[in-house]
Amino acid sequence: MKEERISPKVIERLTKYLRCLENLPQEDYISSEELAEKMGFTAAQVRKDLSNFGEFGIRGKGYQVRNLYADIEKILGVHKTNNVIIVGMGRLGNALFSEPEFTKESFNIVGIFDNSENKIGKEINGIKIRDIKELEHFINRKEDVNIAIITVPKSVAQELTDYLVKCGIKAILNFAPIKLNVPKNVVVENIDLYAKLQELNYWKEKVLK
Amino acid sequence: MKEERISPKVIERLTKYLRCLENLPQEDYISSEELAEKMGFTAAQVRKDLSNFGEFGIRGKGYQVRNLYADIEKILGVHKTNNVIIVGMGRLGNALFSEPEFTKESFNIVGIFDNSENKIGKEINGIKIRDIKELEHFINRKEDVNIAIITVPKSVAQELTDYLVKCGIKAILNFAPIKLNVPKNVVVENIDLYAKLQELNYWKEKVLK
DNA sequence: TAGATTGTTAATCGATTAACAATC
DNA sequence: TAGATTGTTAATCGATTAACAATC
């Protein structure tokens, strides 16, 4: 377990290993060769990625699916429950909240927020939409809410972010198409749906030629 | 205009340049230095990225915001209208369809599909949800539908993909958390919301330490 | 023990950055 | 013309891959 500077690309691949492993017989052993083949990576890369965090395989045999899955979950910190809030209960926020994946044990959505009068107070799946203004109080009351998913219009995303940071949020999954400025001890991941569509379009044009 | 092997990272950054430029005064000139600074890149990288596709700046002056925006749009092929269909009208598909960004001129959603009896025939924003079975006929009738956004459960994503490819779709934006197998002349971009959340969690844990 | 596959080191490849001549 | 900033080449840095000793 060295863990010097880990590249984001390594972490990205770890999540892909998880995706792949979850569809495999849990008691089986899988070699780096086989795992790589399923994802279009090289065996060396799989081994190198994992070696950043320790030794998880058995020489001559491979990796036990169940164990490797659990080990990667642990590396990512998703072996335990992480409390999450969603801010912005438009269609997208709503969809995410209802997404079965997001409601898995590892991410527990403990609060949903909006600022619109006609949404506040309404219930979705048995949880009430709260006023954004309650956020500070809510976070102080609840232990360990440090992840926020924000699905608000880009015009208010930075302002909201400043507020979230002030409330003690340490991690933000941002769906607004702007670069959020945050202090160094806060992390942001961006999902820009439209940008992805634009990228896809570029590759499509190339392929059509 | 050389355009040898363009790295996906370059294309990803191009979309970020667009995002940044759209919020700037259109007649102004911006230097690679200024543009880079806004995004946390280096000036050299901005110039290098652009130089893959031609010469867009004026030495001593910089890039005109309006022109650069238009040039990048053209590189990505989003200066013109691209017809898109969405398959899977669950909450996520619904949210995407209603997303104002997706309804911009450059991407025109011409059809929405599902396979569920109680969705087929319903209207959303004045467009009718069609039966997936109509897809082949629909695509053959409409000119130039070659992008599909798929928001179906992962259990049926590969099967659907095979069908889309058979119907002539060349580009797929996939929200299902699996690697889709497609022929070489078809491109796929993946958006795995849950994976992003897992990545975020890793960086959060690091920052909390 | 022999065969297989890991973990790791060294070699390669690609991407980023620094530097500067070209030129507006 | 002088100052600024591009486009591009060369140097650096980081990530991927090949190769192999370690070991199950």
Image (cartoon, coloured by chain):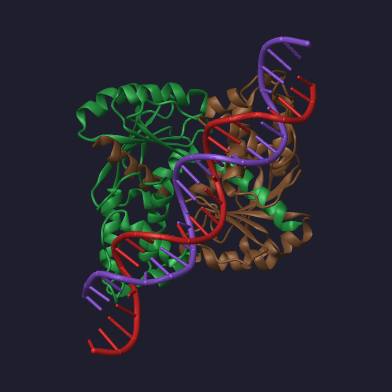
Chain colours: A brown, B green, C purple, D red
Q: Is residue A32 placed above or below A153 in the rendered structure?
A: above
Q: Is residue B99 placed above or below B42 in the rendered structure?
A: above
Q: Where is residue A190 in the image (x, y as percent from the top left)?
A: 53, 53
Q: Is residue B82 placed above or below A37 in the rendered structure?
A: below
Q: As drawn, is A95 to the left or to the right of B46?
A: right
Would you identify the image quadrant in which residue A31 lies?
top right
For the C terminus of chain B, the image quarter is bottom right
* Residue depicted at x 59% and y 64%: A161
Residue A190 visible in the snapshot: yes
Please tell me which residue lies in front, A58 or A196. A58
Please tell me which residue lies in front, D1 or B6. D1
Q: Where is residue B177 in the image (x, y as percent from the top left)?
A: 53, 33
Q: As drawn, is A100 to the left or to the right of A53?
A: left
Q: Where is residue A17 in the image (x, y as percent from the top left)?
A: 61, 33
Please tell me which residue lies in front, B122 or C9. C9
* Residue depicted at x 21% and y 32%: B142
Please tell me which residue lies in front, A12 or B102. A12
Q: Where is residue A106 in the image (x, y as percent from the top left)?
A: 70, 40
Q: As drawn, is B76 to the left or to the right of B19?
A: left
* Residue depicted at x 64% and y 37%: A48
Residue B18 visible in the snapshot: no
Count of marks overlaid on the render: 0
Would you identify the image quadrant in which residue B15 lies?
bottom left
